[in-house]
Amino acid sequence: MIVSASYKTDIPAFYGPWFSNRLRAGKCLVANPYGGKPFSVSLRKPDIDGFVFWTRNVGPFFGVLEVLKVENLPFIVQFTITGYPRQLDAATIPANQAIGQLKQLRDQFGIDVPVWRYDPIAMTSATAAAWHIKNFEALAAQLNGTVNEVVVSFMQVYRKTQRNLDHAVQNQDAEGRSFSWRNPEADEKSLLLSRLAEIADNNNMRLSLCGQPELVSSILEDARCIDDIRLSAIAGKPLSSKSASHRKTCRCAASRDIGAYDSCPHGCVYCYAVKSRETAKARFNAHDPNDISLK
């Protein structure tokens, strides 16, 4: 079994002590997002093929990763770095700091462990196509030799996403950093993706696309974010889990996610996993690292 930790929240940035406690206990409880009973996920070494961590700040988590390395438990770190302006990303660490962390991941654990995510691609008045090209090129140049893959996707406009974006637009900050947003047509998206793929190739990394098969092309393949092939290479042996993903729109291997919605206080206005930053901050502040679940 591959454990995902977590596309619902940033466990490495905010919930490292909780994860360490659950790892020692050998299991955790996960809330059912559809309202059913919570379910238990084993974190015992014999039951684990590997971990996939999702984060925007792995700094507080390096000690945990060292423990996993000693225990011969393979892991991948899906690390989002976008360099977006503050009206979109209210509380993420600066891009230069994040890049330093990615380089530390490579140095300590090897180039196959870190995967850069430039995700989601948000098309706004502050981040138009020309801005993305210039920004992506600068980040890719700094990460040349640090990662071998960059995963991208365009912002999916879920109900939570639209509500959060509209709220941010209607409540511009005190410094007057206003913006508007839009969801471009497929042709415009494809044109930008082609340019980003070229930049990625020039910087010795391949660009893959997460969960948007309608935009896949001859120079751009589907991403495998829960990557059993990469984990097998890191482990130096085939994984036992070969089940297909529950999602039809990607090539991910099957996994169990142990996070919780509405618990990440980063404050990214395009987030699909948080109803409101205030709710997420309140849940984080009330969190007990000794709980069996993130709730």
Image (cartoon, rainbow, N blue to C red):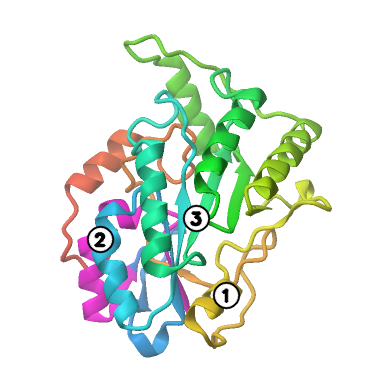
Crowding near the residue tagged with mark 3, few <14, some 14–19, many ≥20 C-alpha atoms within 10 Å: many
In the displayed structure image, the side of residue 171 where residue 223 appears, left or right: right
Give the residue pinned by disc 1.
228
Q: Which mark is residue 146?
A: 3
Q: Is residue 79 above or below residue 244?
A: above
Mark 1 touches mark 3? (CB < 8 Å): no
Crowding near the residue tagged with mark 1, few <14, some 14–19, many ≥20 C-alpha atoms within 10 Å: many
Gap in Å between the C-alphas at discs 1 and 2?
Answer: 23 Å
Instruction: Say which amino acid is labelled 1.
Output: Asp
Instruction: Describe the element under mark 3 as helix, strand or loop.
Output: loop
Q: Nearer the viewer, residue 137 or 79?
A: 137
Gap in Å between the C-alphas at discs 2 and 3?
Answer: 24 Å
Q: Nearer the viewer, residue 200 or 119?
A: 200
Find the magenta span and give its range. 1-29
* Residue 202 appears anywhere in the view: yes
Tell me which corner region of the image, top left, top right, bottom left or bottom right, holds residue 249. Answer: bottom right
Instruction: Describe the element under mark 2 as helix, strand or loop.
Output: helix
